[in-house]
Image: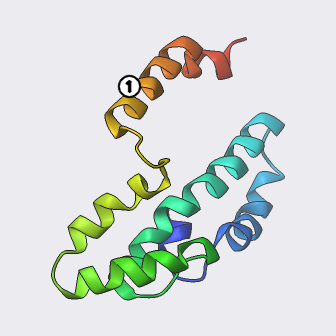
Amino acid sequence: LSVGVFPGLGGIAGLSLVLPFIFGMDPVSGLALMVGLVAVVPTSDTFASVLMGIPGSSASQATVLDGFPLARKGEAARALASEPLGMLPEGADPVEYAAWTVVANVLLNQDSFLTRD
């Protein structure tokens, strides 16, 4: 999460920073670390975009245009809370998406699914 919070430090730079640590890990753990690092960047770069007006990655340039003016008006919490909802399709219900996420997590049972012997 901290990789995306720093402005300009995106997924590729984060991968290059953790690459020396990955060589000493088993392959599954190293791959999980790399995927996890790249997956959090689009969400965590919102903080730099909204609060400082600096895009954390190229994907957050539109967030700067919408979120930073809200933060200057004192509505930073509203801008930070509404950013993930912008990724939903038009007319989609966020509550329904959250419910389907929980159902998928239970069906896949990801904790034991990924670590089963």
Looking at the image, residue 47 lies above or below residue 53: above
Q: Label 1 crowding class (10 Å Cα cut-off): few <14, some 14-19, many 20+?
A: few
Q: Which residue is mark 1?
A: 99
Q: Residue at x 37, y 87 (%)?
A: 52
Q: Residue at x 77, y 53 (%)?
A: 22
Horizontally, residue 93 falls left or right of residue 38, namely left
| Image mark count | 1
Looking at the image, residue 53 lies above or below residue 35: below
Secondary structure type for disc 1: helix
Q: Residue at x 32, y 65 (%)?
A: 80
**Who is closer to the viewer here, 102 or 62?**
62
Where is residue 107? Give x, y as percent.
Answer: 54, 12
Horizontally, residue 112 falls left or right of residue 89, namely right
Q: How is the image coloured?
A: rainbow
Where is residue 65? Give x, y as percent.
Answer: 42, 84
Where is residue 111? Give x, y as percent.
Answer: 56, 21
Q: Quadrant of residue 77?
A: bottom left
Horizontally, residue 50 falls left or right of residue 100, namely left
Looking at the image, residue 37 lies above or below residue 8: above
Q: Residue at x 49, y 59 (%)?
A: 43
Q: Amino acid at mark 1?
A: Ala
Where is residue 79? Give x, y as percent.
Answer: 29, 69
**Who is closer to the viewer here, 86 or 108?**
86
